[in-house]
Amino acid sequence: MPKLEVEGVGAFDVEEGKRLVLAIEEDAGVDILHRCGSYARCTTCRIEYLKGEPEKMTRAELEVLESRDLLGQVRLSCQALCDHDVSVRVLMTVSSTGLDGPGPKPEPRITPDPEWVEKPA
Ligand code: FES
């Protein structure tokens, strides 16, 4: 089972292949935002990897991060699966932003259908 460590919260064993945004929300109990419903549009599910940053990303993640000048600064937890041990810092939550809720519930699979590309150096 992969281990998910969330800074300031703790470490959790999570189901292999679980969508990272859902593991952060359900297993770690963090009120992370996913305002677009986890379709790689809003970037509110953004995280920083403290350990275990994946070398691959979805094309949808790459494009939205590029378009918002966020590439190299954050990653999107809705575009990642728990398939190895990671440590993350969650950057936007309901409690830190004062928004009225996290957003529509993400589907269990990565949406849109992922096309995997290498993370730019
Ligand atoms: S980009 Fe909107 S939830 Fe990930």
Image (cartoon, helix red, strand yellow):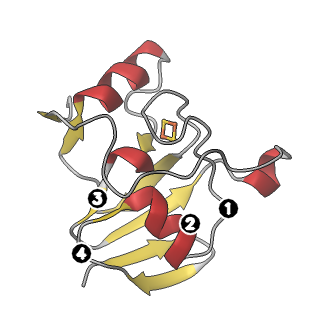
Q: Residue 73, how many percent across, how many down?
A: 45, 35
Task: Work out how far the residue at label 4 is from the one at label 3, CA to CA, in angstroms.
Answer: 8 Å
Residue 58 versus residue 80 in the image, above or below: above
Which residue has dot 4 on it?
Answer: 16
Q: Secondary structure at mark 3?
A: strand
- Distance, label 4 to label 2, CA atoms, is 16 Å
Q: Earlier in the sequence, mark 3 or mark 2?
A: 2
Q: Which residue is mark 3?
A: 81
Q: CA distance from mark 1 to mark 4?
A: 21 Å
Residue 25: mark in rendering: 2
Please report the residue visible at 34 percent of the width from the left and 44 percent of the height from the top.
79
- The residue pinned by badge 1 equals 31
Label 3 neighbourhood size at 10 Å, few (<14), some (14-19), many (20+)? Answer: many
Q: Position of residue 101 (x, y in %)?
A: 76, 50
* Quarter of the image where the N terminus is located: bottom left
Q: Are marks 1 and 2 in contact (CB under 8 Å)?
A: yes
